[in-house]
Amino acid sequence: MALSAAALARLPAAYRREAVTAAVAALPGLGRLRLSDRYGLHRLTAVWLHTRPSPATTAAYLSDRTGYLRWCDGQRLDPLRAYRADVDLWATVLGERYAPATVARKLAVTSSWYGYLLANEVATRNPLAGLDRPALDRDTSATVSLSRAEGPPPGYRPASPRPPSCPRTACATASPPRPWAPAPRCATSRTR
């Protein structure tokens, strides 16, 4: 079950927990689902995800967890029995498909998950411990943005936010429409 950050953010916290728990129940490679097992892999993975600081982080961690567990399942590898050599192979596969920053994030997420399982005495080792992650140049980014010379001068603050110029802008910035309510009409829109 793929959960997007936007979908998670729209859900109230209680429903968010339910959605994440349902997604974790569908993850491959965690063994048989035992709801009564307080320290089972499914429950601990769900709790680990629930403690993430934002819906976007939860969705990204869940996606990364799904990818790693699918890879383990394809290798017929129990994630709790993974060794460093297994993770080295997975990191090589990631490096062929993703940018170094993405590989580093996926490895960090997986190491965090194993660390959580270790803290709860479910895992006996973290196979990512001591693993070299891709070197990242923190001074450059692939994201296009303005340089300091192109941006506003230091300390610049606009006097006030620009008021909406038409009702359409106001509609776009209002609260999200309710599915049962008719869509608002803007005075400047044309009807045919």
Image (spheres, helix red, strand yellow):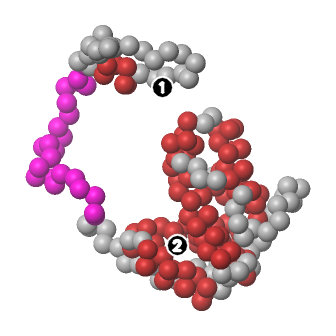
Question: What SS does tag 1 mark?
Answer: loop
189 with respect to 97 (left or right):
left
Q: Which residue is mark 2?
A: 107
- Tell me the tag on residue 81: none
Residue at the spot x=74%, y=56% of the render? 25
Q: Is residue 146 magenta?
A: yes
Q: Position of residue 104 (x, y in %)?
A: 45, 72
Residue 117 rendering spot, x and y as whole percentages = 71, 69
Q: Going by the picture, which residue comes out furthest to the right?
A: 36
Range shown magenta? 141-163
Dividing the picture into quadrants, the one containing residue 77 is bottom right
Using the numbered discs, state the Cα–Cα distance from disc 2 to disc 1 in whole angstroms: 36 Å
Residue 66 versus residue 71 in the image, above or below = above
Q: Nearer the viewer, residue 158 or 90?
A: 90
Horizontal side of residue 120 vs 96, given as left or right: right
Q: Residue at x 86, y 60 (%)?
A: 34
Q: Residues within 10 Å of mark 1 (few under 14, many from 20)?
A: few
Measured along the vertical axis of the image, is residue 11 above or below residue 83?
A: above
Q: Main secondary structure of the magenta part?
A: loop
Whole-percent x and y of residue 79? 70, 76
Residue where numbered disc 1 is placed = 176
